[in-house]
Image (spheres, helix red, strand yellow):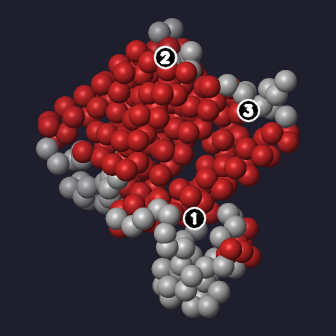
């Protein structure tokens, strides 16, 4: 009987997470540019040389190449290996926390969707529908298989996430985009309504702290717009992995 905590299983999950992370990088680069995910083969963005297979090994290639293209010496963004490592960590943490279960699968898959959405929004100020719309469907399917959430709860989460951000978007007119609304709906489909509330609260708190910090440091002015998607995605990750802990802390801090 596999519990999911065996060292070999965790190593396999990490390896699989790195490979999927590498595909997430392809999505982050190609989807905002309207390019196909399957063809052509990956090339250096600077000199356009098609990359060899050994230049595409997650994390290891980046280290072996010293973070630069072999031929044109252009710098390769450290975001690539970071995405791969974060995705692998999400898979290992999901298995470690929930064992071999539908809940772990749901959290791991949501982690990948959140990494793509958050990083794409941070780099391109957009969250592709090609990520969030399939994400909503996958979230509903996985939640209906997951006794911890269930289909009704997932539908409530979807409606609450999409509905709440739609209202915020109408009230603030311009601060919140359609991509953010669909991202919140997707998070609700995976997390259910309680998890969604924790995700939104965490996202707003972290976003506000970072915005105030940047303003105090003089890096941003009050009127500069900051993409909200990365904070929403971060809130989703916090709710996925620490939801229970956040609720206990909150209840302990305010109801004692
Ligand atoms: Zn190059």
Is ligand 1 closer than 8 angstroms to the Cβ of mark 2? Answer: no
What residue lies at 44% left-to-right and 27% top-to-bottom?
Answer: 140
- Position of residue 155 relative to residue 126, above or below, is above
Q: Which mark is residue 150?
A: 2
Q: Position of residue 71 (x, y in %)?
A: 61, 91
Q: Position of residue 100 (x, y in %)?
A: 72, 28
Q: Are marks 3 and 1 in contact (CB under 8 Å)?
A: no
Element assignment for label 3: helix
Q: Which mark is residue 208?
A: none
User: Would you call the spot at circle 3 few (<14 residues within 10 Å), some (14-19), or many (20 or more)?
Assistant: some
Disc with the residue nearer the chain's start (3 vs 1):
1
Q: Which mark is residue 96?
A: 3
Q: Which mark is residue 80?
A: 1
Q: Which quarter of the picture shows residue 125? A: bottom left
| Residue situated furthest bottom in the rendering | 72
Q: CA distance from mark 1 to mark 2?
A: 34 Å
**Residue 95 vs residue 146: left or right?**
right
Q: CA distance from mark 3 to mark 2?
A: 22 Å
Is ligand 1 closer than 8 angstroms to the Cβ of mark 3? Answer: no
């Amino acid at each position: 009987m596999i519990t999911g905590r065996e060292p070999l299983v965790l190593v396999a999950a990490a390896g699989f997470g790195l490979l999927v992370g590498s595909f997430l990088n392809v999505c982050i680069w190609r989807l905002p540019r309207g390019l196909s995910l399957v063809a052509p083969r990956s090339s250096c963005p600077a000199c356009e040389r098609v990359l060899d297979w050994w230049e595409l090994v997650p994390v290891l290639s980046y280290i072996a190449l010293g973070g630069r293209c072999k031929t044109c010496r252009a710098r390769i963004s450290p975001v690539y290996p970071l995405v791969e490592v974060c995705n692998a960590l999400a898979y290992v943490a999901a298995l470690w926390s929930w064992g071999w279960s539908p809940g772990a699968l749901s959290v791991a898959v949501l982690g990948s969707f959140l990494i793509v959405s958050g990083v794409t929004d941070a780099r391109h100020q957009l969250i592709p529908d090609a990520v969030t719309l399939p994400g909503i469907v996958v979230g509903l399917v996985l939640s209906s298989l997951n006794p911890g959430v269930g289909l009704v709860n997932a539908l409530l989460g979807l409606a609450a996430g999409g509905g709440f951000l739609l209202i915020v978007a109408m009230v603030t007119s311009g601060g919140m985009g359609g991509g953010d609304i669909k991202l919140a709906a997707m998070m609700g489909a995976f997390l259910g309504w309680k998890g969604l509330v924790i995700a939104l609260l965490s996202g707003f708190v972290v976003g506000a702290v970072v915005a105030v910090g940047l303003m105090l440091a003089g890096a941003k002015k009050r009127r500069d717009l900051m993409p909200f998607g990365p904070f929403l995605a971060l809130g989703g990750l916090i709710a996925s992995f620490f939801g229970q802990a956040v609720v206990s802390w909150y209840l302990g801090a305010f109801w004692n």
